[in-house]
Amino acid sequence: MRAISRIFVLLFLLFSAQVFAQESAAARKMLNDVTAKIKSYDNIVIDFRYQVSNYKKNLNQESKGNVTLQGQKYLLNFMGVTRIFDGKKVYNIVPEDEEITISNGDNQKNDGLTPGKMLTFFNSGYKYYMDIAMNVKGRKIQFIKLIPTDSHSDVKNILLGVDSQTHHIYTLIQLDKDGTKTTFTINSFKVNQPLSKNHFTFTAGKYPNYYINRLD
């Protein structure tokens, strides 16, 4: 009987491994399709909703914002702050304090979901599996579960919702190990918009009374 039980256990493990491998391959293909679609656009303009909650910490916040992306350049408006990355430097403009912080930019650093890589962050540092599919306002949203390969990461897992027809990201739900839940939902996704040549250019003359803090 023990020998038979061991055979069943072995067969179950082999079957499970095969299923996970198939799910991983399907998830990878979908993520590759998302990346290819993103790279095919000259620029992307997004309006989004951002929610973060942690009941243990009595945290519950919701904000809206928008971001324009072109290659690694971006212009982000979020929580009353404008952030511009012109490909070399990052400019944080805070009207409430009339202060501008300028620093060298490096979108390759692994310091979280920076605007420049918010739509392609999943291409390294994660294992991935197909998860549930849902119908959202007539759109089929396929969720992919991402698990960090770094065991020391603060992130427990991420559910990435992808529109199966357009291959655009619809939502991102991140669960941290401390119980914090962050949800990023795209309300509007526009591509190849007419942008001025100075769209990602910081002009100090627009802020005559602001204190400028140069960190680098």
Image (spheres, rainbow, N blue to C red):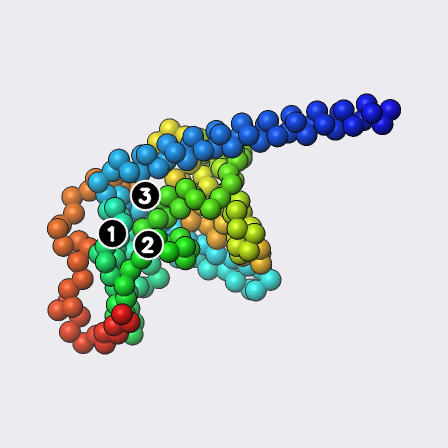
Query: Which is in the foreground here, disc 2 or disc 3?
Result: 2
Measured as percent of width and height from the top left, residue 55 is found at 58, 60
The N terminus sits in image quarter = top right
The residue shown at (24%, 61%) is 89
Identify the image quadrant of residue 64: bottom left
For the question of whether residue 138 can be seen, the reply is no
The residue pinned by badge 2 equals 107
Chain-order first, disc 1 or disc 2: 1
| SS under mark 2 | loop
Mark 2 or mark 3: whose residue is earlier in sequence: 2
> In the rendered image, which residue does mark 1 sit on?
73
The residue tagged 3 is 188
Q: Is residue 18 visible?
A: yes
In the structure shown, which secondary structural element does the residue marked by tag 3 occupy?
A: strand
Crowding at mark 1 (Cα within 10 Å: few <14, some 14-19, many 20+): many
Q: Residue at x 18, y 76 (%)?
A: 209
Q: CA distance from mark 2 to mark 3?
A: 24 Å
Query: Which residue type carries mark 1?
Result: Lys
Q: Which residue does the image show at 35% across and 37% down from the upper left?
A: 35
- Judged from the image, the secondary structure of the residue bearing numbered disc 1 is strand
* Furthest residue in direction right, as rendered: 1
Q: Which quadrant would the C terminus be assigned to in this image?
A: bottom left
Vertical placement of residue 130 versus 62, above or below: above
Q: Mark 2: give few (<14), some (14-19) or many (20+) Cα within 10 Å.
A: some
Q: Position of residue 175 (x, y in %)?
A: 53, 51
Give the amino acid at mark 2: Asn
Q: Earlier in the sequence, mark 3 or mark 1?
A: 1
Percent across and percent down for residue 107 are: 32, 54
